[in-house]
Image (tube, coloured by chain):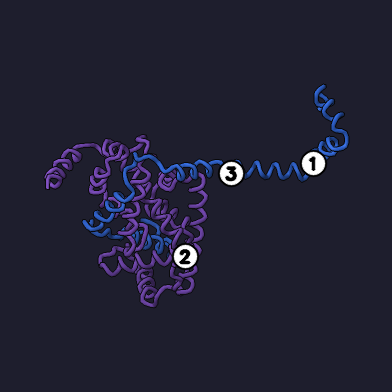
Chain colours: A purple, B blue
Amino acid sequence: MEFEILLPMMDATHESLTDEAIARQVVQGDVDAFEILLRRYQNYVLKIASKHVPPAQVEDVTQNAFIRAYTSLPTFKHTSSFKSWLSAVAVRTCYDFWRKQYRLKEIPESSLSEEQRQWLQTTLASDSQYIFQHRVDMEHARETLEWALNRLSAEDRMVVELVYLEELSGKEAAKLLGWSVANVKVRAFRARKKLQKLLSEVLDSNGITKRS
Amino acid sequence: MRPQKTPLQQFLHILQTGYRYAEAPAPDIHSQHDVMRAVRHIGPLNAAPNPLEYMNQFVWRFASAAGVVILALSGYVAIIGLSPETGVVNQVLDNPVGFLLMQAIGGF
């Protein structure tokens, strides 16, 4: 009973603290303080995960990212903000998710559905500026993206997402993934080539000729 | 006037749009509870580390160096062979007094 009364008071004390101060408390053994960081950044990590993993896996990956953040907290050096450190943990958790999926060969090998092909043809044929006003268009775009990314390796997939889709710099992507900048640049170049080849094949198979 | 995009560029644009469309689910209180349960199960981070776990980390840290040493020694043995040791043993067995004398005056 007494504990239940004390808990909100403890939360109020923690709420006024900076992330870095709370992280320090957690490292010193205050397990409950981690809940404050969890509440502060759950939305943020959910957003990161939703960009990199399928919708059905977002929650699991987010949970794993927080558990990983907790166990890795002693390695947080306070040289960057907690938020950017946590985003790197989240991105690496997404990367590990894909590595596991590829290892278990749980990546669907299906080709584009007839509906997707038709949608793609219509969208490409119209010379509009592709204003996706309808939810269904967005969903088709997302499905087509998933289809294309499923044909890349886990490494290429992460690099394409971070460098070309999220438009991060090589340095930023390298920091998130924990790779060298040179590695990111080389992989990004190769991954882009692979993606372009893949998309060109789709265009050719759908009879959409290349315009110069 | 902007140049018209090629179908490939349009396709890439569609994929980018799809990427930006990703919707994050709403934060779930049950999910928070699951994380905190797992975190409490792990325990405080300042707890004394399990010595076995610590040793495991320590040993693996030197794995690559140990591998290089093993390879170097294997190469050395492959080139030189084990004959020097065999030669010393033979000398001890053949002439133990002479061997000890040589050792004492610094012959070996």
Measured along the vertical axis of the image, is residue A61 above or below residue B44? Answer: below
Residue under circle 3? B64
Viewer-side residue, A189 vs A133: A189
Residue A212: in sight, yes or no?
Answer: no
Dot label at residue A104: 2
Same chain check for tags 2 and 1: no
Residue under circle 1? B80
Q: Residue at x 28, y 50 (%)?
A: A44
Chain ID, mark 2: A
Q: Residue furthest front?
A: B97
Distance from label 2 to label 3 (Cα)?
28 Å
Q: Residue furthest top?
A: B105
Q: Residue furthest bottom?
A: A114
SS category of the residue bearing label 1? helix
Q: Amino acid at mark 2?
A: Leu
Viewer-side residue, A32 vs B22: A32
